[in-house]
Image (cartoon, rainbow, N blue to C red):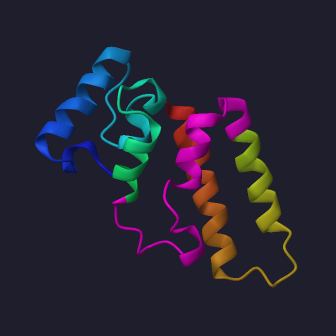
């Protein structure tokens, strides 16, 4: 979910937390600030983030916080890059025929790794 899409009061809260951390501005709520360090806590922000549309994701991934977002909150840069490399390799070597979905996953992991390097 984007901070710019939040209701006014919640958006102001999110922007204030982001300002307190003194980091780069992110409109993506999951990247904006450390949810655990807020008065509201992790669950509050996860519930907000879960409200974002997920129809573009396969059903098994429509369970709340995105896998990439969770990794960004819980892993170091080196761990995230290793995770991306591992998954790219996994989808390159699957024995199910290298269908379109495998190639899309390879592209998604590569784009995510590039995004991590640009932070």
**Rendered view: 42 above or below 53:** above
Residue located 41% across and 69% down the image:
54
Res 101 quadrant in image: bottom right
In this rendering, position of residue 7 left or right of residue 116: left
| Residue 60 in the image, given as x and y percentages of width and height | 60, 73
Q: Residue furthest left?
A: 8
x%, y% of residue 51? Answer: 34, 60
Image-based side of 69 in relation to 20, left or right: right
- Residue 103 is left or right of residue 51, and the answer is right
Please name whichever residue, 27 or 100, is drawn nearer the observer in this view of the structure.
27
Q: Position of residue 61 (x, y in %)?
A: 56, 68
Decide: is 16 above or below 35: above
Displayed quadrant of residue 18: top left
- Is residue 77 found inside the magenta-colored segment of the image? yes
Residue drawn 62% across the image and 43% down it = 71
In reply to whether residue 81 is colored magenta, the answer given is: no
Residue that appears at 46% across and 38% down: 42
Total residue callouts: 0
Q: Is residue 38 above or below residue 48?
A: above
**Residue 59 spot, x, y in % from top left:** 54, 77
Q: Nearer the viewer, residue 82 or 98?
A: 82
User: Which stretch is magenta?
Assistant: 51-80
């Amino acid at each position: 979910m984007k901070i710019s899409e939040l209701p006014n009061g919640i958006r102001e809260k999110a922007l204030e937390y982001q300002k307190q951390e003194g980091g780069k501005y992110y409109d993506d709520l999951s990247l904006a600030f450390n949810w655990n360090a807020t008065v509201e806590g992790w669950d509050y922000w996860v519930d907000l983030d879960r409200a974002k549309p997920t129809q573009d994701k396969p059903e098994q991934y429509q369970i709340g916080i995105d896998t990439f977002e969770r990794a960004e909150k819980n892993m170091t840069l080196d761990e995230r890059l290793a995770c991306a490399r591992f998954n790219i390799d996994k989808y390159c070597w699957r024995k199910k025929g290298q269908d379109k979905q495998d190639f899309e996953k390879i592209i998604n992991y590569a784009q995510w790794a590039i995004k991590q390097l640009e932070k």
